[in-house]
Image (spheres, grey):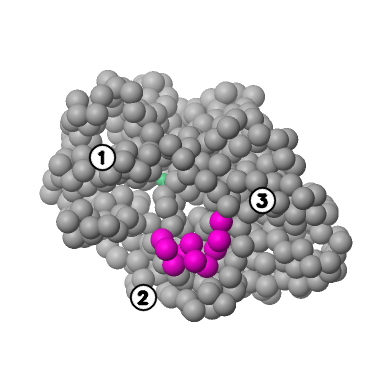
């Protein structure tokens, strides 16, 4: 079974997605997600110019060998563009192998270790009452675990809160700030860490008083704090029993979490911007965190993320795979198959894709009572309608960025 055709499909139904479609000589199709939010075309070029020509004629069954060949023959290692491109090939080959076997992909990864995947959604609001409405809306949709992001008094727009996020204004429309905003330049947001640190614990106190002690609550710091500020936040949130505090410090400095860890028992999650096991080496070995945030899409695919998670398992670190809408339905399906199979599954982030996206990608997963399941179709269980995809050409879009009151650029 050889690869006969390799196509890179760019589509922008509700947002930009990059998909690799591999076709074998016996007609099996494999899909892989290569979407790198805000830098999509860099991965398209990497695939088009340097990977697609190497794939034609290879044995589609050789997943590990192809991974090693693409990683090592490039000489230049790691990095989000390279690893997203390799991920797309890896996932497409797993899709093909599982279709050839006539099995849902999770069966080839060891079989199901659980009946479904606990998923969390994103509740947010500029004010506490808007936030409560958003939590209730998520509960009504079945979510059993909820991320809490809130506006901060004095700040106009910040991560996790759409600038037009009033429920009234968006009636019926899911909050979706995750699309990088379409436009030729990144939108500017403002930031003040002291105001944030004062405000967030009051919000969690209000949420616990309103919704009780049971519901797992999460929060994303989105890389904005210094280690000592993060330690302070973790400590001040301890009474509210968070499931996790995510990306409390900029992720590239693994050592920063040592200091945070010394001061707080609030569980920590990090790694959505990481792309190899090396980004986790110290974190895992020293048990400096609790949840691996990497997506299959950005970490070299199922083969590579499975290895990271198996390493993490030896240290009681669990999965918490990234699942915003910038992970395509193909990437989400890959995450669900992997999450179902591994032993150390923790939780799966799940923001729901829009209708246009679901029309481009038909999917077999189920969402029942707060739990995801990838479904039982052979392969990933996702099909791409190329004609439908063609209706939505790529649109330039950027993630926002941050400035402090004095104009200094800050981490976003
Ligand atoms: C999350 C992430 C996203 C990222 C986005 C960037 O926890 O879901 O932080 O919100 O900002 O995926 O592309
Ligand atoms: Mg995050």
C-alpha distance separating marks 2 and 1:
36 Å
For label 3, the SS is: loop
The residue to which callout 2 is attached is 184
> Closest to the observer: 194 or 215?
215
Numbered range of the magenta stretch:
354-363
Give left or right: position of 348 versus 225: right
Q: Up-down: is 73 above or below 350?
A: below
C-alpha distance separating marks 2 and 3:
40 Å
Q: Which residue does the image show at 47% across and 71% down from the upper left?
A: 12
Is residue 358 on the magenta stretch? Answer: yes
Q: Quadrant of the N terminus?
A: bottom right
Mark 1 closeness class: few <14, some 14–19, many ≥20 residues within 10 Å = some
Q: Is residue 125 in view from this perspective?
A: yes
Q: Measured from the top left, where is residue 148 in percent x and y?
A: 30, 39
Q: Nearer the viewer, mark 3 or mark 1?
A: 3
Outermost residue toward the left in this view: 154
The residue to which callout 1 is attached is 136
Please report whichever mark, 2 or 1, sits nearer to the chain's N-terminal start.
Answer: 1
> Closest to the observer: 90 or 41?
90
Q: Nearer the viewer, mark 2 or mark 1?
A: 1
Picture quadrant where residue 127 is located? top left
Q: Measured from the top left, where is residue 407 in percent x and y?
A: 22, 59
For label 2, the SS is: loop
Mark 2 closeness class: few <14, some 14–19, many ≥20 residues within 10 Å = few
Please report whichever mark, 2 or 3, sits nearer to the chain's N-terminal start.
Answer: 2
Q: Up-down: is 133 above or below 170?
A: above
Task: Judge: label 1 CB < 8 Å from ligand 1.
Answer: no
Give left or right: position of 325 versus 345: left
Q: Is residue 284 in view from this perspective?
A: no
The residue to which callout 3 is attached is 377
């Amino acid at each position: 079974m050889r690869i006969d055709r390799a196509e890179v499909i760019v589509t922008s139904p509700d947002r930009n997605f990059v998909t690799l479609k591999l076709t074998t000589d016996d007609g099996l199709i494999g899909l892989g997600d290569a979407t790198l939010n805000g830098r999509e075309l860099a991965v398209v070029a990497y695939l088009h110019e340097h990977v697609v020509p190497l794939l034609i004629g290879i044995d589609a069954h050789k997943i590990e060998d192809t991974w090693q060949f693409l990683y090592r023959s490039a000489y230049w290692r790691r990095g989000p563009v390279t690893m997203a491109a390799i991920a797309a090939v890896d996932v497409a080959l797993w899709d093909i192998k599982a279709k050839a076997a006539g099995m849902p992909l999770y069966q080839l990864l060891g079989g199901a270790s659980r009946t479904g995947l606990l998923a969390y959604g994103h509740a947010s609001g500029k004010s506490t009452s808007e936030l409560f409405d958003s939590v209730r809306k998520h509960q009504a949709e079945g979510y059993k675990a909820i991320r809490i992001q809130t506006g901060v008094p004095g700040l106009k727009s910040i991560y996790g809160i759409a600038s037009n996020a009033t429920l009234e204004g968006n009636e019926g429309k899911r909050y979706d700030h995750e699309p990088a905003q379409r436009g030729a330049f990144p939108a500017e947001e403002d930031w003040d860490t002291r105001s944030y640190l004062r405000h967030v614990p009051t919000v969690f106190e209000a949420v616990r008083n309103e919704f009780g002690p049971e519901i797992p609550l999460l929060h994303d710091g989105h890389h904005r704090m210094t280690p000592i500020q993060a330690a302070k936040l973790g400590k001040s949130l301890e009474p509210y029993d968070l499931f996790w505090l995510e990306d409390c410090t900029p992720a590239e400095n693994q050592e920063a979490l040592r200091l945070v860890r010394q001061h707080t028992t609030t569980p920590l999650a990090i790694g959505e911007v990481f792309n190899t096991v090396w980004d986790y080496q110290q974190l895992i070995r020293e048990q400096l965190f609790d949840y691996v945030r990497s997506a299959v899409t950005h970490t070299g695919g199922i083969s590579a993320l499975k290895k990271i998670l198996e390493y993490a398992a030896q240290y009681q670190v669990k999965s918490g795979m990234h699942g915003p809408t910038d992970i395509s339905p193909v990437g989400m399906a890959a995450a669900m198959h992997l999450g179902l199979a591994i032993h150390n599954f923790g939780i799966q982030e799940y923001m729901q894709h829009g209708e246009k996206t679901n029309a481009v990608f038909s999917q077999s997963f189920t969402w029942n009572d707060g739990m995801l399941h990838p479904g039982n179709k052979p392969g990933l269980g996702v099909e791409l309608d190329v004609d439908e995809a063609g209706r939505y050409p790529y649109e330039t879009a950027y993630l926002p960025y941050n400035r402090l009151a004095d104009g200094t650029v800050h981490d976003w």
